[in-house]
């Protein structure tokens, strides 16, 4: 096989895993670059200053936001821009309120643990400093959440994608306070409910897989907590995660459950071939290397096809049903 033209490090600074399939990635990228070019031309028909929610904009977002538009589109469609404009304090003013030594210490401990396989975080001290500012500013102005492990990965990837400390802060704030249903409060009540909802969805959509996982004895929390807490960062390839986030900022948290169901459906055979708990946990961890998730364009098509109908109203009914 000819040597791949792609480096060991992706465009966002992450080292590719040892078992990364460069041949499949070459084949995917040769097609995906053409798709990106076509999508960029289509996005040129939308004015930069007008990202009002519409069926057209939703369709465009599901097919991928060009990287040079991501910050503006994420800020507008998520409500982060409104949060920023309505805030009595600017981000720079909020940064000056960092003074809780206990919070500062906890966050500083996690900084070197954030993306240790990313060359930008390991080689550029300023990026870790920006990450500290985003996390500490958020923790000081949200006393209910404060700092929760997992937020460092989200804020870190926001910094890599937006290249803006201020935008990363407002996007983190809108995620935790508006878009995600109480995932990061101390009892993680929203997360636990969504794990129960995922369990119910797999029981309905993939009963054989559900029974197999039950027989082996893997709690959903063991296999999938990181999926939800990190919003699939540190779980799936970077470009795939950003395509998921494109839709998350527009459509809300139901996207996370769509992705979870899709991952399980796409890996059904591998899951059913496991025979004990260690194998099953390894299967869930190894999903990031599968060809089906590297091809982010096809994967997002699957996300909106394989789980079937998935309305926000039905999801809220399921969540209410599983409230403790």
Image (cartoon, grey):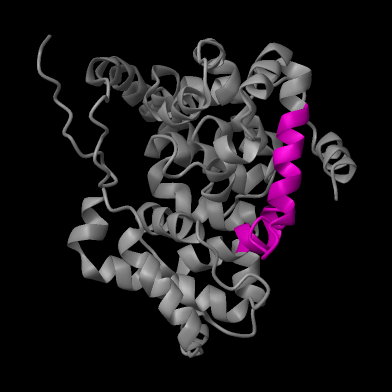
Left or right: residue 28 versus residue 49 is left
**Which residue is pictured at 53% across the width and 44% down the height?**
226
Residue at the spot x=64%, y=35% of the render? 220
Query: Residue 71 placed where, x, y %?
Result: 47, 55
Q: Position of residue 168 (x, y in %)?
A: 47, 63
Residue 46 in view, yes or no: no
Say if 25 sits above or below 63 in the image. above
Identify the residue at the far left of this view. 3
Residue 198 lies in magenta, yes or no?
yes
> Which of the two residues, 315 or 109, is positioned nearer the viewer here?
109
Q: Name which quarter of the figure residue 195 lies in.
A: top right
- Residue visible at 60% across and 50% down in the picture: 51
Horizontal and vertical percent position of residue 260: 61, 31
Q: Whole-percent x and y of residue 116? A: 28, 53
Check if residue 172 falls in the magenta segment.
no
Classify residue 130 by image quadrant.
bottom left
Instruction: Give the total of numbered labels.
Output: 0
Q: Is residue 320 left or right of residue 229?
A: right
Q: Is residue 177 above or below residue 211?
A: below
Numbered range of the magenta stretch:
174-200
Q: Is residue 312 visible?
A: yes
Secondary structure of the magenta portion, mostly? helix
Q: Quadrant of residue 290?
A: top left
Q: Nearer the viewer, residue 284 or 37?
A: 284
Residue at (44% x, 34% y) in the render: 240
Quadrant (top left, top right, bottom left, bottom right) of the N terminus: top left
């Amino acid at each position: 096989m000819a040597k791949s033209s792609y480096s060991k490090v992706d465009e966002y600074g992450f080292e590719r895993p040892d078992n990364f399939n460069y041949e499949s990635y070459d084949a995917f990228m040769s097609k995906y670059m053409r798709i990106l070019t076509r999508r960029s031309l289509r996005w040129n028909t939308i004015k930069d200053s007008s990202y009002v929610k519409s069926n057209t904009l939703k369709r465009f977002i599901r097919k991928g936001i060009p990287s040079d538009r991501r910050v503006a589109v994420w800020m507008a469609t998520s409500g982060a821009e409104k949060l920023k404009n309505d805030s009595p304090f600017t981000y720079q003013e909020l940064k000056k309120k960092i003074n809780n030594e206990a919070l500062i210490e906890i966050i500083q401990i996690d900084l070197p643990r954030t993306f240790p396989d990313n060359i930008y975080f390991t080689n550029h001290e300023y990026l870790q400093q920006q990450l500290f500012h985003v996390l500490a500013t958020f923790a000081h102005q949200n006393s209910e959440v404060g700092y929760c492990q997992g937020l460092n990965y989200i804020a870190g990837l926001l910094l890599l994608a937006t290249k803006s400390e201020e935008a990363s802060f407002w996007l983190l704030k809108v995620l935790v306070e508006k878009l995600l249903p109480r995932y990061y409060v101390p009892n993680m009540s929203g997360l636990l409910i969504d794990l129960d909802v995922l369990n119910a969805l797999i029981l309905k959509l993939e009963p054989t897989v559900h029974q197999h996982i039950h027989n082996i004895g893997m709690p959903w929390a063991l296999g999938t907590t990181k999926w939800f807490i990190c919003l699939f960062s540190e779980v799936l390839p970077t470009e795939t995660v950003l395509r998921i986030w494109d839709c998350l900022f527009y459509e809300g948290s139901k996207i996370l459950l769509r992705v979870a169901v899709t991952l399980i459906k796409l890996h059904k055979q591998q899951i059913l071939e496991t025979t004990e708990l260690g194998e099953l946990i390894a299967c869930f961890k190894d999903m990031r290397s599968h060809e089906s998730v590297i091809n982010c364009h096809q994967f997002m098509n699957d996300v909106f096809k394989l789980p079937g109908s998935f309305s926000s109203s039905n999801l809220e009914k399921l969540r209410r049903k599983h409230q403790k």
